[in-house]
Image (cartoon, rainbow, N blue to C red):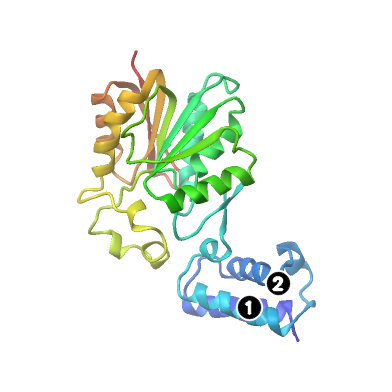
Amino acid sequence: MQTVGAVLAAATERLKQADIAETPRLDAVLLLEQASGLSADRIRLHPADRLSDDVVAVFEGLLQRRLAHEPVSKITGFREFWSLTFRTGRDVLDPRPDSETLVEAVLAAVADRGAPLRLVDFGTGSGCLLLSLLHELPQAQGLGVDLSPAALAVAQENAGRLGLSGRARFTEGDWGAGLDGPFDILISNPPYIESAVVPTLEPEVARYDPPMALDGGPDGLEAYRRLVPDLARLAAAGAVAALEVGQGQDAAVAGLLAGAGFGGIAVRADLGGVRRVVVGRKVA
């Protein structure tokens, strides 16, 4: 029987040598947590604990998947976002810290977090944006829209796990087609990668995130052109719209919102300094 410390050290070195992970030891800890059922703290604090051969074999299988560039979150099935734990998988875009900028932007624009606000999230995926906002807005109701039934199943599971099923509902749809408003908060993290760039993305993204959640057409702006007219139609007077954008796309998306009747356009940068979220308010 091998010890936790020996297995962890060997796996960390293999990940380093393969130049797979930015955080090889953390990746190894999370995979060993999944394989063994031990907590991450137990793994870190008790390196002399011994692991059964069965656990080591399961761990090796998970490690091989990581060595093939599969993200840890896809392997374990979970990812933290906004200090909440979300189910993820191959049917949804992995929740990423950059997207927390959108949650921050919306909350900064809400005058009364206790108001009975109506939210809609287009291309909801895992539901991480909508559910994080509902977590912070206790009287709000939300609708998540997605073209993928598999993604909607993931979002619905996340709503249940977070105790938000009573205030979140999900529907299959093509952006705002067939929807009736009005909504007070309208959000989206649509696909915004240029089609020609998608195959060149890092393997963790190109191989394991759903293509329809990445590909934004020839210039990356196709989804915004389709979505913004729906935002204008469905927004209540004074409603807040917040859209995540790719690097260098903020000016174009701000122009689309302004042309559709949104004012007070502002842009928020993520922690890396990228102008990540465009926010506007529907003019009455």
Q: Are marks 2 and 1 in contact (CB under 8 Å)?
A: yes
- Label 1: which residue? 58
Q: Which residue shows up at 39% across the image and 24% down it? A: 181
Q: Is residue 46 left or right of residue 203?
A: right
Q: Amino acid at mark 2?
A: Ser
Is 253 positioned to the left or the right of 162 in the image?
left
Instruction: Name the amino acid, label 1.
Output: Val
Q: Circle 2: is it few (<14), some (14-19), or many (20+) Cα within 10 Å?
A: some
Q: Is residue 56 above or below residue 144?
A: below
Position of the N terminus by quadrant: bottom right
Identify the residue shown where x is 25% and y is 37%: 226
Give the CA distance from mark 2 to mark 1. Answer: 8 Å
Q: Picture coordinates of residue 157 (x, y %)?
A: 57, 48
Name above or below for residue 125 compared with residue 24: above
Asked if one can make out residue 193 in the rendered structure from this viewpoint, the answer is yes
| Residue that extends furthest to the left in the rendered view of this protein | 218
Sequence-earlier tag: 2 or 1? 2
Q: Residue at x 63, y 43 (%)?
A: 162
* Secondary element at tag 1: helix
Give the left or right position of residue 189, taking residue 40 as reference: left
Residue 223 in percent (x, y) is at 28, 42
